[in-house]
């Protein structure tokens, strides 16, 4: 015979629809088309909580002309691409995030929200006898609000079922690719 200290039994039916649309456009301009701007928005509607979300996004890029090395038989030229981006990103909750610890479902839960700012670069070059390499770097900051908090109980994740927290993420991401 098994005896459980903590048992939660619920019977919940959730019937909902999510509608999503997005629009995006890119403009390239300048001498030799070295500048580009990408703008767009994602629109979501969820009939469960009657929430409409509009997430604008904006990105710009510039590829400056670099003085090329005089390496003989180089198959690849050096290139540098700089970019920046701003955007709002909203993530509607999944069922587990909607459910409170007592098993009831929060009908008023909202999407988790964030505002992102990113600066990045891609630098392509050759080394080691003309082999191509690429160094990608990104600096980022993300402010987050209306997040659903959670806790761990061994391997079990228990969500609060409410939009009760906020936070941020910041850092640098660097990757080197090569052959």
Image: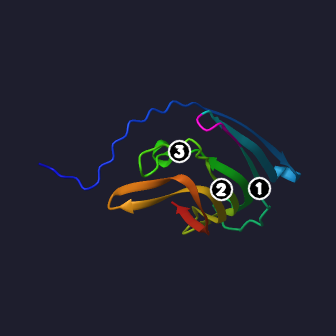
Q: Are the residues tagged 3 and 2 within 8 Å (C-beta)?
A: no
Which residue is disc 1 drawn over? 61
Left or right, 5 with reference to 79: left
Q: Is residue 1 magenta?
A: no
* Residue 110, visible in the rendered structure: yes
Say which label, 1 or 3, has the lower sequence index.
1
Which residue is disc 2 drawn over? 114
Say which label, 3 or 2, has the lower sequence index.
3
Label 2, residues with CA under 10 Å away: few <14, some 14-19, many ≥20: many
Q: CA distance from mark 1 to mark 3?
A: 42 Å
Q: CA distance from mark 3 to mark 2?
A: 21 Å
Query: Looking at this view, is 47 or 173 the one in front?
Result: 47
Q: Is residue 52 magenta?
A: yes
Label 3, residues with CA under 10 Å away: few <14, some 14-19, many ≥20: some
Say which label, 1 or 2, has the lower sequence index.
1
| Residue drawn 63% across the image and 66% down it | 137
| Range shown magenta | 48-53
Which residue is disc 3 drawn over? 106
Label 1, residues with CA under 10 Å away: few <14, some 14-19, many ≥20: some
| Residue drawn 77% across the image and 47% down it | 38
């Amino acid at each position: 015979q098994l005896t459980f200290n903590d048992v939660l039994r619920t019977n919940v039916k959730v019937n909902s629809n999510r509608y999503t649309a997005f629009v995006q456009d890119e403009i390239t301009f300048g001498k030799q088309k070295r500048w580009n701007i990408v703008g767009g928005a994602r629109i979501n509607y969820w009939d469960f909580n009657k929430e409409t979300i509009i997430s604008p996004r904006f990105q710009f890029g510039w590829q400056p002309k670099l003085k090329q090395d005089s390496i003989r038989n180089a198959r690849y030229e050096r290139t540098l691409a700089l970019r920046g981006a701003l955007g709002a990103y909203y993530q509607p909750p999944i069922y587990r995030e909607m459910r409170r610890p007592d098993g009831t479902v929060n009908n008023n839960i909202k999407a988790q929200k964030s505002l992102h700012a990113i600066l990045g670069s891609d630098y392509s070059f050759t080394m080691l006898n003309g082999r191509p390499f690429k160094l990608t770097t990104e600096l980022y900051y993300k402010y987050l609000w209306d997040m659903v908090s959670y806790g761990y109980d061994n391997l079990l994740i228990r969500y609060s079922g409410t939009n009760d927290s906020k936070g941020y993420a910041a850092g640098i991401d660097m990757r080197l690719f090569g052959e």
